Image (cartoon, grey):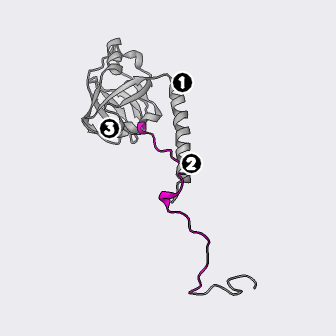
Amino acid sequence: QFGGFAGRNLQDGDELSLGKAAPPAEDAPRLASWSALPEWSLTALPTPILRVVRGAEWDLFDRKSRHSFLETAFTVGAEADRMGVRLEGAALARKKKRELLSEAVAPGTVQVANNGQPILLLGDCQTIGGYPKIAHVVTVDLAPAAQLLPNDTVRFEQVSLDEAVALFEERANDLELFRVALSLRRK
């Protein structure tokens, strides 16, 4: 008998033997037990800590203000959306008030408004800003930053540029492992 089924094309009602059925999914061995890390979400932290590198105008702020920025918690104000969040807390003072030229900003930039309150720029932020930039949230903390809601509290922790790069590389590696783990999941 040549080709097809019983030497002919398949027809309605033909039944094919496929061999032994696979075990139910709950009995099957797990191929990947890796899951998303809890620190990828702010819900895992009572007071989220966003890591930052110093901004271009870090040194324009007095020592007390730089200390307050890193050591005190800020509350997310009512003005919070995809463009950014206005934070409320200790007022941050510059050594000298002077006009700054508008410069490029990006998601993660922390500017300080004229009232001394920080503004954390998010995904839909403008591209140019004129407020001093005290810091920049590291890339791996941008997703948790976007989860901030009014009345949440947040703190900042300074890291070096080298640490920020290492965190980025570690996250890229974690995401690749996650991608592979998802591809191995049984459907």
Q: Front-most of 93 and 33? A: 33
Under mark 3, the amino acid is Leu
Residue found 41% across the figure and 19% down from its top: 58
Under mark 2, the amino acid is Val
Answer above or below: position of 63 versus 79: above
Answer above or below: position of 70 versus 165: above
Mark 2, Cα crowd under 10 Å, few <14 / some 14-19 / many 20+, is few
Residue 77 percent across, percent down from the top left: 25, 34
SS assignment at label 3: loop
| Secondary structure mostly taken by the magenta-highlighted segment of the chain | loop
Report the disc number at residue 180.
2
Report the disc number at residue 72.
none
Under mark 1, the amino acid is Asp
For disc 1, the marked residue is 162
96 in magenta: no
In three-dimensional space, the C-alpha distance between marks 1 and 2, rounded to whole angstroms, equals 27 Å
Q: Front-most of 42 and 35? A: 35
Residue 125 percent across, percent down from the top left: 38, 39
The range drawn in magenta is 13-39
26 in magenta: yes
Determine whether label 3 and label 2 are within 8 Å by CB.
no
Q: Quadrant for residue 115, please give it.
A: top left
Report the disc number at residue 148.
3
